[in-house]
């Protein structure tokens, strides 16, 4: 370990965390050990913590006190993780309605957060210190799987306006100390991209962190200008928050000369899973219980695909119990070659808003339409907006090699999947605008399945 990194991990970061009343360092120490536990021991640990969370919720969180009384539910009597299924799912709408009743009466230092939410509607929720410590510790552990530690220089390509709004003095001090450099992803003009490429070369990061679309975009830009980015010793590119496509992975790996580690999680649901060098997407099982449910909310057996529902065990201050993420995934029981006991999540199929509804009622993943457009030569950017069951708009940015005859192919391909009666409108644009968050969404549907 380099001297500066050693000082940061050993002294400065623990001090920073203590000043903020976080227990990250202790949590991380435990996580380094528990990642090697076997499935039975991890499940046992989850059960103990689940019981404690539910008891705490009953004693201190008005929403759960009322709910448990109504259901005649006794947290002490929980004998098995399957008992969790006796509680209802928590939706974003529930959080919106019961925002205040979800706060623990003894919570201190709750921070307010706001995400775009799956439908583009903002979701407001609160995060307590315990949870911050656990989420930061989980990320820290995952970076160490790739030989990166806290204090190693890191470039973060991110767009959340909240993160940027919080550029107060403490945060700037922290970022400088921890050598984290934030590049805002929502504006990617050629001038900005020149700056980004220069900044990455100046910082010589050990790690890149960001949206796959943003990192792939920067990589492609550097490539086109013949700027080498693979000579800085970047160890890994962590991508998260969007679906990772093969062509993005290939572009990032080629340009930066490092592997891509896919991650899954969010401010709301927590640091759910991250890829290890052996390829397994490991759940943060000490903190998060993942259930997969069908369209009726019934729990599905491992191996079957359904909506990802999470219970975050470090959320006593503002509980996330059986929270519906809107994402689709599969739990995988095969052990990972790396030897860690943390169970695996596979095939995260993207946000539920990536789903489209055909005229005959078929719900399909956005990829079904993405494939119609993505691989046509000359397509630079696109966005599919399903306005209604009878109207879909395609925003399309192309370059010189694009063959105009392909417009007809796109229209036919979309109609073939969504229904022959659908009006497909292709709008040519120079640039497809990103979401306010800086995230790039390929498919948006305004049709409720
Ligand atoms: Zn592994």
Image (tube, rainbow, N blue to C red):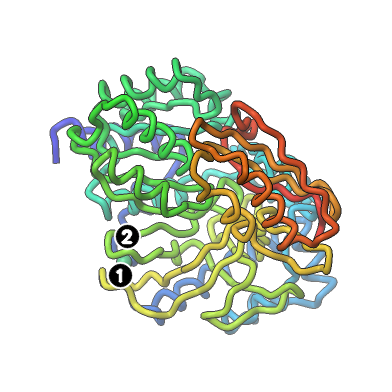
Disc 2 residue crowd, few under 14, some 14–19, many 20+, Cα 10 Å: many
Rounded to the nearest whole Å, what is the CA distance between mark 1 and mark 2? Answer: 9 Å
Q: Is mark 2 within 8 Å of ligand 1?
A: yes
Question: Which residue position holds label 1?
Answer: 340
Residues under numbered marks 1 and 2 in contact, where contact means CB atoms less than 8 Å apart: yes
- The residue shown at (81%, 46%) is 387
Seen in the picture, residue 9 relative to 244 is either above or below; the reply is above
Which residue is the extreme one toward the top?
Answer: 191
Mark nearer the N terminus (1 vs 2): 2
| Residue 430 point in image, percent of width and height | 60, 26
Q: Which is nearer the eye, 123 or 411?
A: 411
- The residue shown at (72%, 62%) is 416
Seen in the picture, residue 37 relative to 423 is either above or below; the reply is below
Question: Which residue position holds label 2?
Answer: 276
Which residue is the extreme one toward the front?
Answer: 405
Q: Which is nearer the eye, 382 or 372?
A: 372
Q: Is residue 316 visible?
A: no
Horizontally, residue 63 falls left or right of residue 47, namely right
| Residue 73 point in image, percent of width and height | 75, 76
Horizontally, residue 335 falls left or right of residue 167, namely left
């Amino acid at each position: 370990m380099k001297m500066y990194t050693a000082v940061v991990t050993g002294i400065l970061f623990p001090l920073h965390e203590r000043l903020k009343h976080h227990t990250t360092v202790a949590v991380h120490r435990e996580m380094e050990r528990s990642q090697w536990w076997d499935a039975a021991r991890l499940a046992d640990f989850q059960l103990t913590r689940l019981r404690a969370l539910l008891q705490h919720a009953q004693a201190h969180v008005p929403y759960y006190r009322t709910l448990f009384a109504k259901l005649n539910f006794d947290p002490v009597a929980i004998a098995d993780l399957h008992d969790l299924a006796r509680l209802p799912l928590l939706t974003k709408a529930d959080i919106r309605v019961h925002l205040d009743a979800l706060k623990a009466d003894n919570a201190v230092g709750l921070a307010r957060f706001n995400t775009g939410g799956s439908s583009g509607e903002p979701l407001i929720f609160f995060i307590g210190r315990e949870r911050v410590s656990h989420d930061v510790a989980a990320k820290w552990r995952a970076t160490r799987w790739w030989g990166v530690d806290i204090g190693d220089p890191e470039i973060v390509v991110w767009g959340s306006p909240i993160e940027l709004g919080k550029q107060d003095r403490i945060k700037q001090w922290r970022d400088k100390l921890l050598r984290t450099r934030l590049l805002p992803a929502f504006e990617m003009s050629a001038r900005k991209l020149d700056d980004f490429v220069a900044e990455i070369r100046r910082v010589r990061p050990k790690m890149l962190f960001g949206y796959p679309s943003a990192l792939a975009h920067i990589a492609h830009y550097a490539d086109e200008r013949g700027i080498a980015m693979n000579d800085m010793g970047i160890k890994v590119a962590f991508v998260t928050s969007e679906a990772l496509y093969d062509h993005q992975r290939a572009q990032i790996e080629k340009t930066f000369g490092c592997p891509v580690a896919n991650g899954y999680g969010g401010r709301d649901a927590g640091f759910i899973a991250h890829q290890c060098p052996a390829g397994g997407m490991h759940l943060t099982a000490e903190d998060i219980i993942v259930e997969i449910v069908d369209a009726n909310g019934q729990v599905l057996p491992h191996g079957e695909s359904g909506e990802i529902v999470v219970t975050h065990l470090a959320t006593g201050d503002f509980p996330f119990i059986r929270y519906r993420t809107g994402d689709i995934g599969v739990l995988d029981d095969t052990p990972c070659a790396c030897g860690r006991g943390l169970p695996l999540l596979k095939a995260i199929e993207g946000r539920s808003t990536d789903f489209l509804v055909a005229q005959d009622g078929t719900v399909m993943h956005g990829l079904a339409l993405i494939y119609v457009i993505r691989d046509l030569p000359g397509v630079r950017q696109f966005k599919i907006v399903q306005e209604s069951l009878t109207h879909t708009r395609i925003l399309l940015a192309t370059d010189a090699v694009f063959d105009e005859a392909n417009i007809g192919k796109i229209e036919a391909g979309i109609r073939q999947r969504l229904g022959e009666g659908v009006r497909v409108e292709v709008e040519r644009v120079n640039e497809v605008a990103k979401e306010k968050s800086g995230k790039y969404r390929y498919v948006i549907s305004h049709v409720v399945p």
